[in-house]
Each structure stands twice: as structure tokens, then as C-alpha cells.
Amino acid sequence: MTTLPVAHLPAGWQPAGDTLVDRVVLVTGAYGGLGSAVARAATRAGATVVITGKRKRQLEKLHDAMREEGLAEPVIHPLDMEVATPKEYGALAEGLERDFGRLDGIVHCAASFAGLTSIAMHRPDDWLRAMHVNVNAPFALTQACLPLLTQASDSAVVFVLDNPELLQRAHWGGYGVSKAALERFVAILHEETDESPLRVHAMLPAPMRTALRRLAYFGEDILQRPTPDAGAVAAVYLLAAQARAARGAVLNLRSDQ
């Protein structure tokens, strides 16, 4: 069970074409299943979207696909969160300020998961990578962007969690530990920003059709799971001013909790 307060998406809520108008939103892990869905949904809601990830070619493919779909072109900013330094995160924030003069939201979709394994057999490199990409990098990126985020009249940072009841079981390893640490980070950052324009949110998606799900549930018919579109709609809600009442909480999209 999550230690955060629980919020729910208002019944029937759907973003409009101007829900995020005039907002600049940064999406990490943007070419993944959830990340690409969030990039599209935020663009449809009127945001200027900056997409980031370590593979420039994958970012370019997402850019081209969105253009072909008639969406506004996202801005590409490659960033390898496995090896990025504080200087590189600072350079990203400086680039956003130079190019747009603002930042109104971040959705942390990047995640590292190497598969289910016991602690005894866990590769140390995989453990360290999970902790770094899933906890340290969101901290470093958010910290670098805090000055820009708090300059906005209303801004939001969205962190993606995973089922805490499942992740405390055997074999979830560094990924499970990192998501628990990320949840605590959300709570602390909320306490420190609750009186500021910056809203801190967590999101707990329902099971969805992603590469991470396929790796974790080998043998499951992944096509029976819904696409990440519902999670993307929820992320747009959290980025929007309507979600002020949900700050500091986890937006639970799972039907079993």
C-alpha cells in the first residue's frame, strides 16, 4: 500500500485542446510506451513538449511520427540519464530558459528494469542502473529545473510509481527498491514545495501495454492489456491547474486499489 494520500481522476475527465495551452512540458523516457503517449497527449492539450531520452534516433522517430499524425512537432533534447552529470542537467534547464523562458511541467517516464531476479543473483550493474535512472536522475533533473518551475504561476512535476504491494515481493530487486525510494522522494519534495507554485504529484498507472510489462510478465498476452493512453490522459490532468487538489498525492488509476 502506498504511504502517500490517494487521489482519483475525476469521473469522465478528458483534456481539451487548450488544457495545457501556453505551457512548456518536459517528458523523460519519451520514446517508451508511456512517454510517447504522454508526449502526444500533452501536445494535443496545447503544450509545447520537449522530449528527452538517451537514443537520439528514437526521439527523431517519435518527432517524425507526431508530425505525420498532424501534431505540433516536439522539441528534441537527447539526454542519457544513466550517465548525465549535474552540469548536463543544468545545461538542459538553461536551454529551456533560453529557448522558451519558462518550464511548466515535467513528467518522469524514464525507467530502468532489467527483469525479475533474486537478490542473490542480481547483477550489481543492473541494481545501480535502476537506482540511478529511477531515483537519482529524477532528483537531479528536478533540482536543476526547480528555479524555472517555481517562476511559473502554476507548475507540476509528475513521478510514475508502480504497484507497491507487488513490488515488495520476491524478485523485484533494484526496480522495486527504487520505486519505493521514489515514493518517499515525492513525499519529501511535496513537503518542501507545498506553499510554492510547484505541485508535486505521483501517478500509479493501471497495467498497460509496454515493453516493461512484457519483460516482467513473460508469457502474458500483452495485447490483452490496454495501451498507455489512459495513463497519458491522467498525466495531462496532473499537469493542468485542475489538479491542485491532488498535489502531494498519488493519482491511482488501478481498479483493484
Image (cartoon, rainbow, N blue to C red):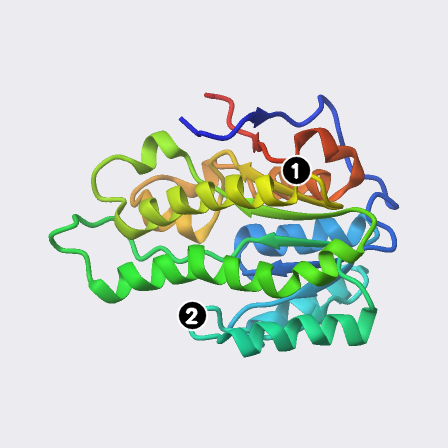
Image location of residue 250, percent across then percent down: 55, 33
* Residue drawn where x is 61% and y is 66% of the image: 144
Q: Residue 108 is drawn in which quadrant?
A: bottom right
Please tell me whether mark 2 sits on a helix, a strand or a loop.
loop
193 over 152 or under it: above or below: above
User: Does label 2 or label 1 sit earlier along the sequence?
Assistant: 2
Image location of residue 55, percent across then percent down: 52, 74
Single out the mark in the foreground, 2 or 1: 2
- 86 or 9: which is nearer to us? 86
Reading the image, the residue beneath label 2 is: 82
* Residue drawn where x is 60% and y is 44% of the image: 192
Answer left or right for 147 relative to 99. Answer: left
- 251 or 71: which is nearer to us? 251
* Residue drawn where x is 20% and y is 62% of the image: 123
Is residue 55 in view from this perspective?
no
Please tell me whether mark 1 sits on a helix, a strand or a loop.
helix
Q: What's the amino acid at mark 1?
A: Ala
| Labelled pair 2, 1 in contact (Cβ < 8 Å) | no
Marking on residue 156: none
222 over 91 or under it: above or below: above
- 237 or 197: which is nearer to us? 197
Answer left or right for 192 relative to 184. Answer: right
Reading the image, the residue beneath label 1 is: 234
Image location of residue 164, percent across then percent down: 38, 34
Image location of residue 203, percent across then percent down: 56, 38
Tell how many labels: 2
